[in-house]
Image: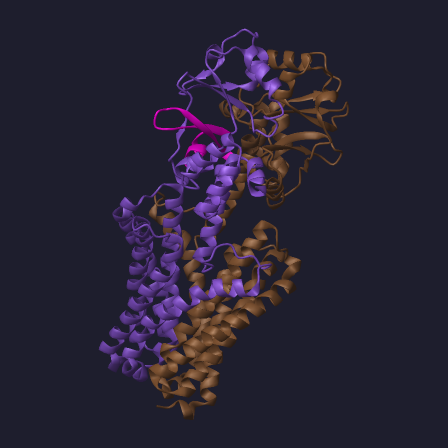
Chain colours: A brown, B purple
Amino acid sequence: GQAAAVVDLLPSDLQADLLGQMQADAAEEVLELMQPEEAADARALRGYEETSAGGLMVREFLQYPDEWTVEQVVNDLREKSEEYRDYQIQYAYVHANQGQLLGVLRLRDLLLQPRDTQLSQIMIPSPLSVSSDMNLEETHGFFQQHHFLGVPVVDDTGALIGVLQRSDVDQAWIEQQDRSFLRRQGIVSGEEIRSMPLWVRSRGRLAWLSLNIVLNLLAAAIISNFENTLAAVIALAAFLPIISDMSGCSGNQAVAVSIRELMLGIAKPSDALRVWFSEVSVGAINGVVVGCLLGAIAWIWKGNVTLGLVVGFALALNTLIAVSIGGVVPLLLRKLGRDPAVASGPLLTTITDMCGFFLVLSLASVFVEQLKM
Amino acid sequence: GQAAAVVDLLPSDLQADLLGQMQADAAEEVLELMQPEEAADARALRGYEETSAGGLMVREFLQYPDEWTVEQVVNDLREKSEEYRDYQIQYAYVHANQGQLLGVLRLRDLLLQPRDTQLSQIMIPSPLSVSSDMNLEETHGFFQQHHFLGVPVVDDTGALIGVLQRSDVDQAWIEQQDRSFLRRQGIVSGEEIRSMPLWVRSRGRLAWLSLNIVLNLLAAAIISNFENTLAAVIALAAFLPIISDMSGCSGNQAVAVSIRELMLGIAKPSDALRVWFSEVSVGAINGVVVGCLLGAIAWIWKGNVTLGLVVGFALALNTLIAVSIGGVVPLLLRKLGRDPAVASGPLLTTITDMCGFFLVLSLASVFVEQLKM
């Protein structure tokens, strides 16, 4: 009973969030105790994805039939001013008899018009609207293009069912980016803050670290396979972590650009081939540059030109591989319905480490006689 | 001349951005050709930091003296409706004779009141306001706490000088997070998109990669120093990249939480000691867990218990070090006025690699007889 009274007071989008987080039967219990009108709204919103236009829209907005006059609207505002107190009102919406959205009314225009004017004469006709099943990327994109503070939400029949506010979309967008930043760094459980209990914080990080040990062992197994080569050319050991770190870094740059392009809606999973080509050129240039750099350093440092050639060539080729994989992996993960932010990093690092170690060590075992110092 | 005409048409916050990006004398030339009133506004805004309240505020807003009546306001709206067309108007502001902010007026309240009512009677008195020099963190925090669409901006004397809109603050906040995500991944030059010229994209990434080679060499030098130990216990070579990757991963988790807490305003540079203590506990727990895991794996894999102990102990201790450093480094960089997003990663990785390699290899050289297989 008390819960229902509290829920009654919340704006409709928060009601839906709250009820969505409750068990189905507990939510139903609360819904039955709420005021019938509020309960119907909450039920309707509960059916939408939390971050879709339907899930983020509010049901508190002003709508009037097109045949109403300015006078009728002003009277309505006066009568229900208590009820409208907390509405975020800048516009009112004008609808046809069947509920179809016809136009938008700027409240200030009401101030300037004779009281017997019909709404259909002063409304802005055929306003832009969004569909209730648009996702967060799409609605965020909409507000990037249009400088509106809110946009009406319509259902399949064109009927007005809510208003989506820019501030709610921006808020949801920021939260999504925030979550995905943390998950990319291995805080998988969500939003860690240092005031949380120690155990919760440790556990959330350990899940990621344990997975990483397993992946690292795959790469280490390759090194172990070449112990004879390493024993003959011990100087190589110092270059293995460099190859691993540099390739991971190049690959992660490509991952970052892909994740950002996915978020901005510039890249889609079907663009994988285009992205691959685009990264191959960057990878070729950067591979040659960093390969020559590291090769020259290895040659001068260890005084062996073959070592320089082996290390440099391996890094150049592996940079190309890392960048191609890094650019494409987020798109493929998105296509598979996985979160690119969480899975791209470790997948990329494991593959590029394995390739990198294999390249250096197998090249070295071919030229092992020239490498002995 | 043409430039000035174009600039005249922009909203005041965009004018300021644009002029801010021009050379000082070119900007002055444009300012002199602009309409005097617009030029004065633009000049005033140019003095503020781009993302401060003053830099983001708009100067297009409605303000009226407190002794005006509803009738006078409605007449003003009617007369200047053309000029006000593109204003984002939901509120009007009421000021005293000297310009001091006295109250806020909801436009819909104008609809409901007799035309001879004085504004001072229907305004919401003593409204919240922000100071023009508040930074982005502070104004974003303000809008997190208050569900306003806009807030008046006042100068030192309490005079109303502009209106800060939630949408502009959210936009600037998203852009800041977006930029900082890319820079953290090594896209230092800003916002790379794949449609940019190949050369620009390669160069932006290469700056970062070249720096990374140098830092990696510092860690590699430590490995080179222990070539005798490595030659005696060649199995160690497979564990060096694991130590490096695992410590980097633990440290980056702490970096991520610190950067997020800095952004949310939960942590300040002066909290470094508290953050350090808080990370030490997580680092101790996670260090023991991953140390035992990797130690056990090394023991079973290579069949040498001393190898397990050396590798496990080194990883445990280095995890503790990595996490302590990772938590504190972003706060120290912020205190030094550096961007924590860009510099934290490579700094952390270099230090933890050096510590990790030194720990494993120096321990191994102590127990080298027991490690020989």
Q: Position of residue B73 (x, y in %)?
A: 55, 15
Residue B151 covered by magenta stretch: yes
- Closest to the observer, B128 or B55: B55
Q: Position of residue B140 (x, y in %)?
A: 44, 37
Let me know if residue A355 appears in the view.
Answer: no
Q: Position of residue A247 (x, y in %)?
A: 47, 70
- Closest to the observer, B39 or B204: B39
- Identify the residue at the far left of this view: B366
Q: Residue at x 62, y 22 (%)?
A: B81
Quarter-of-image position of residue A108 = top right
- Quadrant in the picture for the C terminus of chain B: bottom left
Part of the protein shown in magenta: B141-166
Q: Residue at x 57, y 17 (%)?
A: B76
Let me know if residue B135 appears in the view.
Answer: yes
Q: Position of residue A134 (x, y in %)?
A: 65, 42
- Closest to the observer, B262 or B366: B262
Q: Residue at x 46, y 42 (%)?
A: B28
User: In the image, is B233 to the left or to the right of A155?
Assistant: left
- Quadrant in the picture for the N terminus of chain B: top right
A306 versus A203 height, above or below: below
Quarter-of-image position of residue A221 = bottom left
| Number of numbered tags placed on the structure image | 0
Residue B109 covered by magenta stretch: no
A349 versus A113 height, above or below: below
A343 versus A133 height, above or below: below
Q: Residue at x 37, y 90 (%)?
A: A372
User: In the image, is A267 to the left or to the right of A244?
Assistant: right
- Identify the residue at the far bottom of this view: A369
